[in-house]
Image: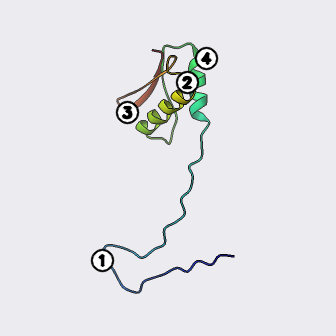
């Protein structure tokens, strides 16, 4: 058993608070990204707006680009960010 001693300073600081760093949590992987790309490929559309909530548009675009690269679909799908909206298109 490992005991952790937490050092709490009695000195008052102006700009900082003596506090232990919380453990880093791995973000969970979401299936929606791959499902979104697969749904677009099966739809036959030339372009479509992506509608995944709780993710900022820039982050969503970056994640979709990385998923397209990982699945080796660069020649079939393009990710575009226009006016804070993410689109999938065929090149």
- Mark nearest the camera among 1 and 2 is 2
Q: Which residue is mark 4?
A: 42
Labels 3 and 1 touching (C-beta < 8 A): no
Residue occupying the far bottom of the picture: 10
Name the front one of labels 4 and 2.
2
Q: Residues within 10 Å of mark 2 (few under 14, many from 20)?
A: few
Residue 48 in percent (x, y) is at 48, 21
Q: In the picture provided, is 58 more to the left or to the right than 66?
A: left
In which quarter of the view is residue 73 placed?
A: top right
Residue at 56%, 33% in the rendered image: 33
- Residue at the outermost left position: 14
N-terminal label among 1 and 2: 1
Label ID, residue 84: 3
Label ID, residue 14: 1
Q: Earlier in the sequence, mark 4 or mark 2?
A: 4
For mark 3, does the 10 Å Cα neighbourhood hold few (<14), some (14 to 19), or many (20 or more) residues? few
Q: Of marks 4 and 1, which one's residue comes earlier in the chain?
A: 1
Q: Is residue 9 above or below residue 87?
A: below
Coloring applied to the structure: rainbow
Mark 2 sits on what residue? 72
Left or right: 1 in relation to 43: right
């Amino acid at each position: 058993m490992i005991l952790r001693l937490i050092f709490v300073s009695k000195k008052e600081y102006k700009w900082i608070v003596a506090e232990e760093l919380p453990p880093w949590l791995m973000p969970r992987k979401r299936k929606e990204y791959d499902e979104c790309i697969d749904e677009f490929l099966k739809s036959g559309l030339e372009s479509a707006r992506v509608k995944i909530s709780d993710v900022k548009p820039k982050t969503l675009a970056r994640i979709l680009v990385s998923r397209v690269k990982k699945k080796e679909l660069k020649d079939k799908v393009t990710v575009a960010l226009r006016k804070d909206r993410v689109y999938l298109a065929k090149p």
